[in-house]
């Protein structure tokens, strides 16, 4: 589904990604771990199409198409979703309207008719339950006045409604207490299927107790230094990151 | 000669002394009215405007219509037992204290803040206006909708006097029927007695060649509340001076302004809030969205006088420029003469927020639609303060129609 080859990216002339190779197939869950500043969030943002990164070499292929050629909205229409580390507040833009426009733009791209208000609302209500999102949040402005945990829950709710093929979760666990983490992780687990893939960026092994990965990658100094299964995460928790770099 | 005639004669003398403001004037340096100087004194001729189907539909209101500054009885609908009358009728039916109070609204002083020749001329020569006098403890059961239909010169002076604890909603709406060149010289003089509450809408949608010059002058007594919603969409040039005097303790005012401009439109608001008494509150929010070669001016001054302790005051002005040829000149000013106050003010001029744009695009909203939606949301935040939903929807649609937009986001707003 996703093939990243020798990806180099820089911000303001400073190299952040220095040759990333990663292959993600349908049905898989990948965890990308690593110390602060290693490039984890950059990788997620580059895949989602955020401005401000200069790709100096390498390629990102998604469903056999060149992802780097696509605008952020085209990527969304093709099924790429980014759950933000810091979801932005958008006063005056209604949470549900935003999603409805997103869903219908995606449907249009796929040659499908727009959902009518009734069908859309029934999907929204069903998905809100999945992450135990209070229905009153649906009619509020996007993320405005939401607590940190509510924002993260809203991200997973949006993911559920947009039903992506490739979901990138950028530090979705940060700022969540244990109950909120359980709810959010539970939501993600219910969205796992043989047809989609999930890439989680995280600092902590904690999240992986709830969402079990098939692969764990250690990203340090702009490169994936080591790949293993979930036992690697436990080892990292115990020993830190330094030994991985030394070994590499 | 009666009191009101005398007062108006003095106003004419002041006009002769002041003349019209020029760009050499500090408060008029961005707004050039010289092209309309010759229009000031032109007599309106009769028009064949039919007012019946004009204005905002679906409003359940009392209706007062002025066509080129002249009361139009046939399309108006006034309450019977309340003092809401055209000026001429008020003058012929009132005397004594009521007339004296009304006459004071024509009293213009050279040293009043932002005094200028237009206001003096208006006081001297207004052809008509609404005289609204609400008795103490009365509540107007329906909003008063004052529709001004202009395609020539017109001079209108309103007086709204709300007695103690009286409540009203007044919607002033200015529209034009065709693009003839004219000057609207408008004034609304307002007195709110103790505990009175006024919701005041000013919706400026004059035709594209009209100039609109106005003064809104509010005096507030104890614990009275004044709310202004000033919307600027139309006209070639518009200049509105808003003056609020929080004269007695516990009074509060909220001023909400929205300009959505395009082409070569020019809109200038000068606001001046005087905190004269203790424990008064003022909140001011102005937003502009400027496209084309439009030019907006915002000058907001808050003056906190020596005795006005425990003043709580805030002012913000946000501006979005959609075109590199559009211009905003913004100047929030605070002058404070005591230490016991809470004041905040600020202005921003900006493009849209990149983080918000990326967030929306990552959810599948096209770049174009995301920009349009954010622009509309920015404007709509000011309108959220409107209590009257019919007016709000009307303004939203009119503002929306002026902004660049595609049908996708229209769907998002009406669903």
Image (tube, coloured by chain):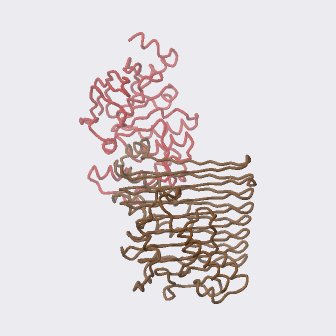
Chain colours: A red, B brown
Residue that protrudes farthest toward the top in the picture: A246
Tally of marks: 0
Q: Nearer the viewer, residue B162 or B337?
A: B337
Q: Is residue A136 above or below residue B357?
A: below
**In the displayed structure, does residue A115 sit left or right of residue B118?**
left
Name the spot of residue B346 as percent of width and height, x first. 56, 47
**In the displayed structure, does residue B191 sit left or right of residue A146?**
right
**Quarter-wise, where is residue B361 in the image?**
top left
**Quarter-wise, where is residue A216 in the image?**
top left
Q: Is residue B7 above or below residue B365?
A: below
Name the spot of residue A13 as percent of width and height, x first. 36, 25
Residue that protrudes farthest toward the front in the picture: B17
Placement of the N terminus of chain B among the 4 image quadrants: bottom right
Name the spot of residue A179 as percent of width and height, x first. 58, 37
Q: Nearer the viewer, residue B387 or A225?
A: B387
Q: Is residue B143 visible in the rendered structure shown here?
A: no
Identity of the residue drawn at 55% across and 72% down: B16
Identity of the residue drawn at 45% across and 11% down: A243
Identity of the residue drawn at 33% across and 30% down: A54
Q: Is residue A109 visible in the rendered structure shown here?
A: yes
Q: Nearer the viewer, residue B57 or B149?
A: B149
Identity of the residue drawn at 69% across and 73% down: B166
Q: Which of B313 and A101 is in front in this view?
A: B313
Placement of the C terminus of chain B among the 4 image quadrants: bottom left
């Amino acid at each position: 589904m996703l093939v990243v080859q020798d990806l180099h990216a820089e911000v303001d002339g400073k190299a952040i990604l220095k040759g990333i190779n990663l292959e993600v197939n349908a049905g898989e869950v990948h965890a990308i771990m690593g110390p602060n500043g290693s490039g984890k969030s950059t990788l997620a943002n580059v895949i989602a199409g955020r401005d401000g990164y200069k790709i100096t070499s390498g390629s990102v292929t998604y469903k056999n198409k060149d992802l780097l050629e696509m605008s952020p909205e085209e990527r969304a229409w093709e099924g790429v979703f980014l759950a933000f580390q810091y979801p932005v507040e958008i006063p005056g833009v209604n949470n549900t309207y935003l999603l409805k426009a997103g869903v219908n733009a995606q449907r249009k791209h796929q040659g499908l008719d727009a959902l009518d208000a009734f069908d859309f609302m029934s999907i929204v209500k069903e998905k809100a339950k999945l992450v135990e999102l209070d229905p009153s949040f649906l009619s509020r402005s996007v993320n405005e006045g939401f607590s940190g945990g509510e924002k993260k829950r809203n991200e997973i709710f949006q993911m559920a409604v947009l039903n992506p093929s490739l979901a990138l979760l950028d530090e979705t666990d940060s700022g969540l207490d244990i109950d909120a983490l359980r709810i959010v992780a539970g939501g993600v687990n219910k969205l796992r299927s043989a047809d989609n893939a999930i890439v989680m960026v995280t600092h902590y092994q904690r999240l992986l107790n709830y969402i079990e990965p098939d692969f764990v990658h250690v990203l340090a100094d702009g490169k994936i230094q080591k790949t293993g299964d979930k036992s690697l995460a436990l080892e990292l928790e115990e020993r830190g990151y330094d030994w991985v770099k030394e070994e590499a | 000669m009666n009191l009101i005639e005398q007062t108006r004669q003095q106003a004419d003398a002041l006009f002769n002394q002041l003349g019209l403001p020029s760009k050499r004037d500090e408060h008029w340096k961005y707004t050039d009215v010289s092209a309309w100087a010759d229009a000031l004194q032109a007599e309106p001729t009769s028009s064949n405007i039919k007012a019946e189907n004009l204005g905002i539909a679906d409003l359940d209101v009392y209706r007062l219509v002025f066509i080129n500054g002249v009361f139009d009885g046939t399309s108006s609908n006034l309450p019977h037992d309340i003092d809401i009358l055209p000026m001429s009728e008020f003058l012929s039916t009132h005397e004594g204290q009521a007339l004296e109070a009304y006459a004071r609204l024509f009293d213009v002083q050279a040293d009043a803040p932002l005094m200028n020749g237009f206001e003096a001329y208006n006081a001297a020569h207004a052809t008509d206006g609404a005289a609204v006098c609400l008795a103490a403890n009365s509540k107007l059961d329906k909003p008063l909708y004052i529709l001004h239909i202009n395609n020539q010169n017109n001079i209108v002076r309103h007086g709204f006097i709300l007695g103690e604890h009286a409540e009203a909603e007044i919607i002033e709406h200015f529209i034009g029927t065709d693009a003839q060149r004219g000057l609207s010289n408008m004034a609304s003089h307002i007195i709110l007695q103790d505990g009175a509450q006024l919701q005041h809408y000013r919706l400026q949608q004059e035709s594209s060649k009209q100039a609109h010059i106005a003064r809104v002058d509010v005096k507030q007594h104890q614990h009275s509340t004044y709310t202004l919603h000033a919307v600027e969409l139309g006209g070639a040039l518009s200049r509105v001076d808003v003056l609020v005097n929080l004269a007695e303790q516990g009074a509060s005012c909220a001023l909400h302004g929205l300009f959505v401009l395009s082409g070569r439109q020019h809109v200038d608001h000068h606001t001046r809030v005087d905190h004269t008494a203790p424990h008064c509150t003022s909140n001011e929010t102005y937003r502009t969205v400027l496209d084309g070669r439009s030019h907006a001016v915002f000058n907001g001054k808050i003056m906190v006088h020596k005795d006005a302790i425990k003043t709580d005051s805030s002012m913000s002005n946000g501006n979005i420029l959609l075109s590199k040829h559009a211009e905003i000149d913004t100047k929030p000013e605070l002058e404070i003469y005591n230490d016991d106050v809470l004041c905040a003010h600020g202005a921003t001029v900006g493009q849209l927020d990149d983080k918000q744009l990326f967030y929306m695009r990552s959810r599948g909203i096209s770049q174009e639609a995301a920009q349009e939606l954010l622009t509309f949301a920015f404007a709509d935040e000011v309108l959220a303060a409107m209590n009257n939903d019919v007016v709000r929807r009307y303004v939203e649609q009119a503002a929306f129609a002026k902004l660049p937009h595609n049908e996708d986001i229209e769907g998002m707003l009406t669903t």
